[in-house]
Image (cartoon, rainbow, N blue to C red):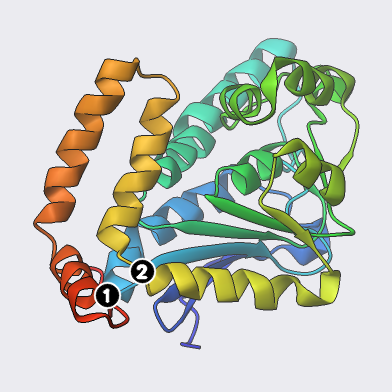
Amino acid sequence: MTTPTAFETIRLSSQGAVAVLTLNRPQRLNAAPPAMFDEILVALRSLPGLGARALLITGEGRAFCSGADLQGRPDPGAMTRGSATYGSLTGSYSPTMLALSKLALPVVCAVNGVAAGIGCSLALAADFTLAARSAYFLQAFVNIGLVPDGGATWMLARQVGKARAAEMMMLGERIPAEQAQAWGLIHRAVDDAELMAQAMALAERLANGPTVALGLMRQGLARALSQSYDEALATEALHQSICANSQDSAEGISAFIERRKAVFKGA
């Protein structure tokens, strides 16, 4: 694994073609101030320079992310709190979540503990979310008189349906990892001791795949959730034409004809 790039609240390193982004405030259960999401955005933008072909996100210590860091927020009045919250969302959290959604790389998330609030949104934004059996997901906003953010209202309704999304958002109860898997909220719940090994194995599998096609697949899936059928067909045709011109597609077709395993380069 390469030497991590220097950040204050996260770590960014690489293992082969897999970039590993670790939330790194374990003493605060990786509670996320706006500065953490600013750093995540910088890290996302640096991935092409690292030669990354897949991204793995996890947390340091016993939590994935306990939500936005509420300590140190200004409290002179509701109007100031509202303005500060709006500024944090539109200036830090939302731009980072949007950049993650548009990333042209497959994303795996290893949830090693609580994923609450904005941390829950971050975890569920991955293409494949694996969670330790001891982990849980929590939309805790209702408990402090707020609404979900980080794209949670958009994601949850599409991932688990309106009824279960309402349960998570309006009751604010924990969803254990195995229940999250049963709901289709995450890819898989795994034994705690196996989490990182299984997450890395999956990330490496994706990194060794045709990443041009994989990147377009994740973009196509995101668009399809709000597109009409004819719009989805048009998007597929455009993405297919891009993939057909890629070196990986030529390699895949040659390997199929020659009855051998394809060796993809991500180009």
Residue displayed at 58% across by 18% down? 83
Dot 2 lies on which element? loop
The kind of residue tagged 1 is Phe
Distance (Cα) linking label 1 and label 2: 6 Å
Query: In the picture provided, is 187 more to the left or to the right than 140?
Result: left
Residue displayed at 64% across by 22% down? 157
Q: Where, quadrant-wise, is the C terminus in this rendering?
A: bottom left
The image quarter in which residue 151 lies: top right
Q: Residues within 10 Å of mark 1 (few under 14, many from 20)?
A: some
In the image, 39 versus 255, the foreground residue is 255
- In the displayed structure, 74 sits above or below 65; it is above
Name the residue that disc number 2 marks. 209
The earlier-in-sequence mark between 1 and 2 is: 2
Q: Position of residue 172 (x, y in %)?
A: 87, 26
The kind of residue tagged 2 is Gly
Name the residue that disc number 1 marks. 264
Dot 1 lies on which element? loop
